[in-house]
Image (cartoon, rainbow, N blue to C red):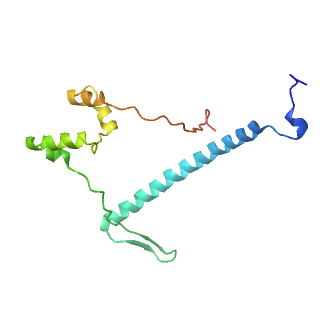
Amino acid sequence: MVGTAIDPMEFGITDPRADVEESLHRIILLDQQIKALTDEREILRDAARMALNHDGTPIIDMERGIVAMFREKRKPASIDLVAMAKHPEQGVHIIEAARSGVLNASLTPLRALKGKAEWVDALLKMEMPSGITVELRIESTRSN
């Protein structure tokens, strides 16, 4: 029977879109809960930071076995190109590093300076296209 539509319901196949739509609704609800919990966690963390900043001694909850303290964390090493650029004779090294591909520019601060300095606009003219990715975004179009 060419041209005759098959009804999936005849074969016990339910509408998968309805199942997915229900899942999408559940995802939105979970995202809202996660955001609320994340916001609450940050408020509580800020309170703990303030208490620790007050006298610097650890906060210890012996009953629950919880300790809060500041611990130093090493930042990754970086090259101070600003200091290097203050010495004209060092400019050649910065240029050579760029030519060899070991320097990258941060686009976010550059874009914020667009139109404010000639060197910024010159760098932005050299922006290389990035790859295209596809991201699944699920957002609520109405508030609950």
| Residue at the spot 45% in from the left edge and 35% down from the top edge | 131
| Residue at the spot 49% in from the left edge and 75% down from the top edge | 65
Task: Provide residue 106's location: percent of width, then percent of height.
Answer: 31, 40
Task: Provide residue 27's location: percent of width, then percent of height.
Answer: 64, 45
> In which image quadrant can residue 73 be found?
bottom left
103 lies left or right of 34: left
Task: Provide residue 122's location: percent of width, then percent of height.
Answer: 25, 28
> In which image quadrant can residue 127 be found?
top left
In the foreground, 105 or 114? 105
| Residue at the spot 22% in from the left edge and 44% down from the top edge | 97
Residue closest to the far bottom: 62
In the foreground, 39 or 71? 71
> In which image quadrant can residue 88 be found?
top left
Image quarter where the N terminus lies is top right
107 lies left or right of 98: right
Task: Provide residue 129's location: percent of width, then percent of height.
Answer: 40, 31
115 lies left or right of 93: right
What is the total number of numbered labels drawn onto the structure image?
0
Image quarter where the C terminus lies is top right
Residue closest to the far top: 3
